[in-house]
Image: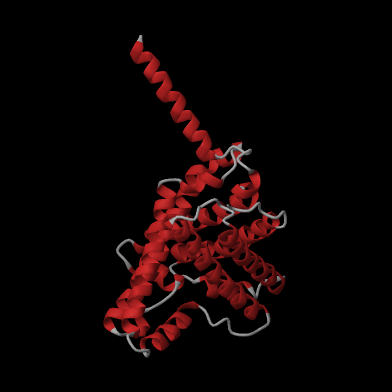
Amino acid sequence: MAQQAPAWVVPVMRAGYSARALVYTVVGSLALAAAIDGGSAEGTTGALADLKSEPFGVALLWVIAIGLLAYAVWRFIAAALDLERRGDDSSGLFARGGLVVTGLIHAALGVSVGSLAMGRSGGGGDSGAQDWTARLMQLPYGKWIAAAIAAGIIGAGIYYIHKGMARKYERTMRVTPTTRKLDPALMAGFVAQGTLIAIVGALLGYAALTADPSEAGGIGAALDQVRSAPFGRVALGVIAVGVLGFALENLVEARYRIVPARSGGEVETLAARAKAKAKAKAEETARAAQR
């Protein structure tokens, strides 16, 4: 039986989503600037490194680092206590495993951002991705391990796209005038983020197949791939707006997201509202057919 969420989980969750909103606001803004002026797009770590030179940049980096670590803690606790009511069957355990993976990713990013704030190299970005890919390929069966990881990353990207298109995020989003108005932007944000993640996975997969670690890269490389395509600056602009939409989605989640194991079903979500409207429409259609 899933446990009741402790009260402190909610502010930790909100801090985590707020930090992600800041991260993707910086990344999306720099990508949009690159689309407009034709410059090079920055990945997550590169964008945050640029932030350090701004007024109060170091303080903001610390806020982001702590928030990302808070988000990681939230994901770990949500998986352990099943705070999102995923269940203990195979699909539920798979979903909870995904929470652990995203927690680990954001914990690593939080540590990297903290290192940037302390004046050290974050070890991230495209060169970081190339370095760990090279080390991975030196292992026995490293090429196939890298290919498997690439497939997982592509799968994660597809999942984000599906989550946006199917509006799966509505399951934990409280109904308010704001969330109803912003729903299309939230969907577009998930699709854009999923597209970038899938491109990162494809770059890693190509690096594995060609045994060339230099082909691997992070978000910055993915954005550069978009820019180098036909009509790339237009496509990069669209993706950049989508990334800003994902930043908005995280900000909305920071404010309006619920923890199912704490709300107890007492708070109406966008998904519950849509389901009720669909049921009412079906009943109305059935009554009209009987007349």
Image coords of residue 212 (percent x, y)? 32, 85
Q: Could you tell me which residue is drawn at 59 percent across and 47 percent down?
A: 260
Q: How is the image coloured?
A: secondary structure
Which is more toward the observer, 151 or 53? 151
From this viewpoint, is residue 259 visible? no
Q: Is residue 206 above or below residue 96?
A: below
Q: Is residue 76 above or below residue 148?
A: above
Closer-to-camera residue (279/70): 279
Please state the total of marks drawn on the protein image.
0
Percent across and percent down for residue 168 are 46, 47
Q: Relative to residue 267, is residue 80 depicted above or below?
A: below
Quadrant (top left, top right, bottom left, bottom right) of the C terminus = top left
- Where in the figure is residue 69, as x and y percent of width and height? 63, 69
The quarter of the picture where residue 286 lies is: top left
Query: What residue occupies the far left of the structure in this picture?
Result: 210
Whether residue 67 can be seen here = yes
Residue 287 position by quadrant: top left
List x then y, in percent, for residue 219. Answer: 45, 70
With 75 as the anchor, is 15 left or right in this view?
A: right
Q: Residue furthest front?
A: 1
Left or right? Give the position of 179 relative to 41.
Answer: right
Residue at 52 percent of width and 71 percent of height:
105
Residue at the location (72% across, 57% down)?
8
Figure check: 285 above or below 228: above
